[in-house]
Amino acid sequence: MRNALPHTKSAATAINDHNLRYTTSIKSRRKSNMNDAHPSTTADRWSLDALYNGLEDPAFLADLERFDELRANLPAYDALDGLPLIVAGIRLNEELESLGTRLFSFLSLQQATDVMNADLAGRLNVLAMKLTDFQELNVRLNNAIAAAKPEDLERQPSLAPYTYTLSRRRLAASYQMSPALESLAARLDISGGSAWGELFERLTSTLTIPWPNTEAEANTEANAEADGTPESGHLTLTEVRNLAYDPDPAVRERAYQAELAAYPQIATPLAFALNNIKRQVNLLDHERGHASPLDASLQQAAMSRPTLDAMIAAMRQRLPDFARYFQARSRRLDLGERLPFHGLFAPLGSSPKRYTITEARDLIVAVFGSLDPAMGALYARAFDESWIDVHPRHGKLGGAFCANLPVIKQSRILTNFDGSFGAISTLAHELGHAWHGFCIEDNEALNRDYTMPVAETASTFNEIHLAGYMLEQATTDDERLALLDHGLLELGQTVVDILSRFLFESRVFERCQTEFLDVDTLCDMMRQAQLEAYGDGLDPDVLHPYMWACKSHYYSSHMSFYNYPYAFGSLFATGLYARYLDEGPDFIRQYNALLTATPTHTVEDAAALVGIDITTRDFWDRSLDLIVERIDRFTALCDA
């Protein structure tokens, strides 16, 4: 699992979330002095000049002024109704989408590499508050669309590209409060749910953990002058979590214990944050007429309940197979019959060589250029034109994400590269998001917003393709074991761990309606969810009860259940890749067409474009069959 920004969200609906809602991950490990050990000619940090040349750039100031002009002109829409309101409102949203994406992305991307910058945080809050001024108009617009005759809308040339968008707004109109209440809710969220989410980011990104008298302390001191690393004898939460990948079992166990010992410092405010975000979501979803936050999430995802139920049922049936994988892993690591949590990410087998960022670039461009020359060319641009912020440093978010920027026909990728194959796989994953952005960048302004389930399609497809290539290149069983383990470990996260998160969040939503869930209660609920999902795969006495305190999945007031889309992405991409293996290069054209269509189709309709029915078990069972085949191969190598 990695820290992912799947795509730039609609300015009209989600920029209140500051355009970035990060997940927290231990996918990208930090190795000190990595830059010195592996010098490269590729730029280390991204450039945002294609957006603006700083906060004093005349273009930035002019766009801020234009944003205020749009707000000032809002009273002119009060006299409009019916078709005139629809045409004018859609035109306004087109401009707002492009302008808002540019402004919010510029500020948010700066903040991603400078999380303690109070000026950026303040500017984002001001801009987000101003955006709420448009909320009332958008509610009126949705109501007007719902009341209009479809044939009247079809006769308007400016609305012709937006048949799907209009249908989505028509549905949204049946799940919204009055214009005044929606406007008030958007304003209150700035100091409510969104503020609690910002508290999570601040606490987890600034928490430091004692780590004295070790090589890690020396490494920390060596880096302190260069990038502002925390004081001697301390590591950040991200750095300590990254030690879960350390080859030394004593380091892994110590890091695990240090991490769990550190959470009480921030657990109480995080418990308040989690309770209040979920209470707010429960209240507003009820007032809008949703049966539950899950139903609201599925509507937001353009996904049906039968699809989710079919996928979850298939996942549950294969949990014993994943338990076999974790048990085999534990035996191979000599950790007993059941895997302790601190062994979950331990390196296994002989990993491929370590890579410089330049070597990583060349490998990725070659592997994906053979899949699709246009894809390889785009990935070369990403490296060569400073789209990627590569290495970890103090004040920069952990993990990785990709932000699509269709307004400039580019993307930006944050990663914490350490030279491992896992770091290259992370790059391939995020570049998959960039490819998805490339496929939709020529869509009309309001047809670029694809939903969370399909957001993970291209990224996971990339990971599978890269892993297949590396397996073909492997020359020893030990190397094959490491590569199989890397893929299965990722799938274990996106299937098994995601299921535990889905179960946990479902129960939090239910229980927080009638009780305050304190730290001990949340930890007990997380243990239970992990036991239910991992089964006999993990040691029940060595779990991670504070997983709720380090995953920002739970801390968004705008995106509940930020978990099942990852399972969907993994299994959907696995099934698509199986089609590619069956049909060869000709399938890539269908695949790219599917990606292009994702913003203008429901999840089910997008799948149907390539002849797949995802509302029944068959597709999901076939995807999991392929994964179980890898588990069988892995366990055979472990036991050989």
Image (cartoon, grey):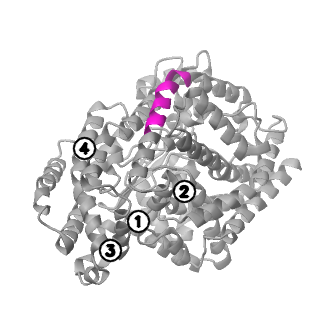
| Residue neighbourhood size for the residue with mark 1, other residues' Cα within 10 Å, grouped as few (<14), some (14–19), many (≥20) | many
Q: Which residue bears the numbered disc 4?
A: 129
Q: How far across and how far down the image is residue 479, in percent?
A: 75, 50
Question: Closer to the camera: disc 3 or disc 1?
Answer: 3
Q: Marks 4/1: CA distance?
A: 30 Å
The residue type indicated by label 1 comes to Phe
Q: Marks 3/1: CA distance?
A: 20 Å
Helix, strand or loop for disc 3: helix
Helix, strand or loop for disc 4: helix
Could you tell me what secondary structure mostly forms the magenta stretch? helix
Is 440 part of what is drawn in magenta?
no
Q: Marks 3/2: CA distance?
A: 25 Å
| Residue neighbourhood size for the residue with mark 3, other residues' Cα within 10 Å, grouped as few (<14), some (14–19), many (≥20) | some
Helix, strand or loop for disc 2: helix
Q: Residue at x 77, y 35 (%)?
A: 539
The residue type indicated by label 4 comes to Met
Name which of mark 3 and mark 2 comes first in the sequence. 3
Side of 198 relative to 560 (left or right): left
Q: In the image, is residue 634 above or below residue 40?
A: below
Q: Which residue bears the numbered disc 2?
A: 565
Side of 360 relative to 440 (left or right): right
Q: Which residue bears the numbered disc 1?
A: 438
Name which of mark 2 and mark 1 comes first in the sequence. 1
Q: Is residue 48 visible?
A: no
Q: Marks 2/4: CA distance?
A: 29 Å
Magenta residues, start to end: 263-277
